[in-house]
Image (spheres, helix red, strand yellow):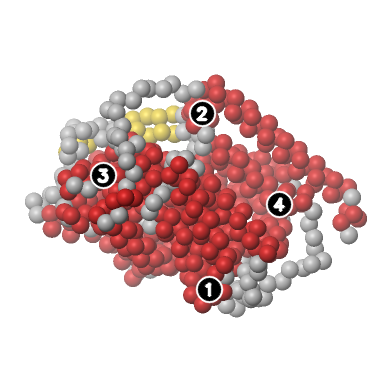
Amino acid sequence: MIWKQVIDPFNSIALSVLVAAVPILFIFWALIIRKMKGYQASLIATGIAMLIAILVYGMPVKLALLSAAHGALYGLFPICWLVLMAVFLFNLTVKSGQFEIIKHYMASITSDRRLQALLIAFSFGSFLEGTAGFGAPVAITAAMLVGLGFNPLYASGICLIANTAPVAFGSIGIPITVASQVSGIPELPISQMVGRTLPILSVMLPFYLVSIIAGVKKAQEVGPAVLVSGISFAFLQYFSSNFLGPALPDVIAGLGSIVCLMVFLRFWKPKTIWRFANEPAATLNTDISYTNGQLLRAWSPFLVLTIMVIAWGIQPIKDALNTAGMTQFEFPGLHNAIQGEDGTLLAKVFKLNYLSAAGTAILIAALIAIPLVGLTYSEGLSVCGATVNQLKFPILTIASVLAFAYILNDSGITLTLADVLANTGILFPFFAPVLGWLGVFITGSDTSANALFSKLQYATAQSIGVDPVVTVGANISGGVVGKMISPQSIAVAAAAGNLVGKESELFRFTVKHSFIMLFFICLIVLAQAYALKWLIPTYEMLGSQKAAVSPDVTKGYTYLVVLAVILAALAVTILTTAKTKKETPDLAN
């Protein structure tokens, strides 16, 4: 049996939109007003969405249940798999005592909370978004900030907000690749369009972040550092997105801004060191000093993590890993059982890429790191068990949030909301980012939002005489500011920041900032569409057919051998320096 999606079930788009918006409005009400726990709000919202899908949109009960199951399965893998491994890696560092050395090192650079947030949440988080994506940046950076002594709410909240700037180019540019495939516009002009929008946000984001943490006056005190961080990031993001393509802007901008800020802080220090209220003054015990070998060992989990996520983002390695370890199957009873309004059957294929998943890369990094940080594998197993117990409610939350998203999409509820925005005429460029924002809020992924709406953005722009690359780029740019309030992202940040059960507090912390940034991007896109047309890149559409290229598995295996050699050399170096330190304890005194 094939069921066809309905976009306007009441034959009155106004009434249909009111009903379609109920599950989303419930999420806002439950988290902002009712202050529900994340898993409770998401489970109830899933139930509401299912009832509307069945009773209003006419979706068969079987398909609704299967759609929810499909979403929950995707929530467990790869999303929960990645979050679990990211927190596991961090917990290993804490358990071994190496994180104390990292904290001392960070304090030696700066013990100012404002500047630590820029280094870790903004710059390092961008680097992780560019390499791993899918929740890893927020999970790792929030855990690091909490470990450094940050207030958990601020740690998680600012990591979510900081993650806006790099999301468009996350996971080696996958969101833009998907937008290109769906819309037919080549990757480079989309990258250029986004790269002429987001750097405006990026240059202001460091000051915005610090103002949230400490207030505007305290942000002005570190103005020079804020400028170095924001300008270096924005310039590198602009340059790489416009001239190198969508794969590397986050990696280049993230690393570049870290280097620029660290170099700058060698020559400039704030007049006063800012800490949270009621937090003890920063103290750096000058009697304690660590050798380069000890620092290398302490940072080794994150060095290995960096190497692994970069390697896992290289296409030949992905191809080799998928060839050796990927299972995919058509979801029983759901695959090709739903017909879109355009007549196409919706393929529902679940891919279990257990080797190429980012979570697997982090697991391997953790397994390598266990002996490097001085733990035994039995101790590592104990830490893993504790991590699973720590994340049991976030896992439930993420699974139910993805079930919610899949029901909205498969039933046509999402398309009802999109249809209204697409009929705003000449004002559509202003609302185009809202469509991307909505897509990311529902799905938790800029990639998924682009898959949903890029074709709609393209067709609507053509109908009103606006260059489609503006609105397709707007879908991506608007989506990035929806990430910070997506229930999926909230659940990940709460898990990493020890805020399980307090998701509503985190949602209330970020929601106003999401709307402020969305309005700002809407104005930019509207100006690009009509007043700043010189910003629009020239391009030719992709051909209707692309030659199929077989994956170069041999090259991938070669790269894996090189990776193994690099990791082995790093491990030997770390273990050798650690052993030398143990054998000569008096030399350090």
Q: Single out the residue that lies furthest toward the right.
A: 586
Element on which disc 3 rests? helix
| Foreground: disc 4 or disc 2 | 2
Asked if marks 4 and 3 touch (Cβ < 8 Å), the reply is: no
Residue 468's disc number:
3
Q: Residue at x 48, y 28 (%)?
A: 319
Residue 316's disc number:
2
**Along the polypeptide, which appears first: circle 1 or circle 3?**
1
Q: Which residue is under mark 1?
A: 220
Element on which disc 4 rests? helix
The Cα atoms of the two marked residues, 4 and 3, are separated by 49 Å
| Quarter of the figure with the C terminus | bottom right
Q: Which residue is under mark 4?
A: 298
Asked if marks 1 and 3 touch (Cβ < 8 Å), the reply is: no
Q: At label 2, which amino acid type do we have?
A: Pro
**Along the polypeptide, which appears first: circle 1 or circle 4?**
1
Q: Residue at x 52, y 34 (%)?
A: 314
Q: Residue at x 47, y 47 (%)?
A: 239
Q: At label 1, which amino acid type do we have?
A: Gln
In this view, the residue in front, 298 or 184, is: 184
- Location of residue 297 in the rendering, given as x and y in whole percent from the top left corner: 73, 48
Element on which disc 1 rests? helix
Q: Single out the residue that lies furthest toward the front.
A: 534
The Cα atoms of the two marked residues, 3 and 2, are separated by 32 Å
Residue 96's disc number:
none
The Cα atoms of the two marked residues, 2 and 1, are separated by 46 Å
**Along the polypeptide, which appears first: circle 3 or circle 2?**
2
- Location of residue 63 in the rendering, given as x and y in whole percent from the top left corner: 25, 40
- Location of residue 8 in the rendering, given as x and y in whole percent from the top left corner: 13, 49
- Location of residue 559 in the rendering, given as x and y in whole percent from the top left corner: 59, 28
**Along the polypeptide, which appears first: circle 4 or circle 3?**
4
Rendered position, 505 above or below 242: below
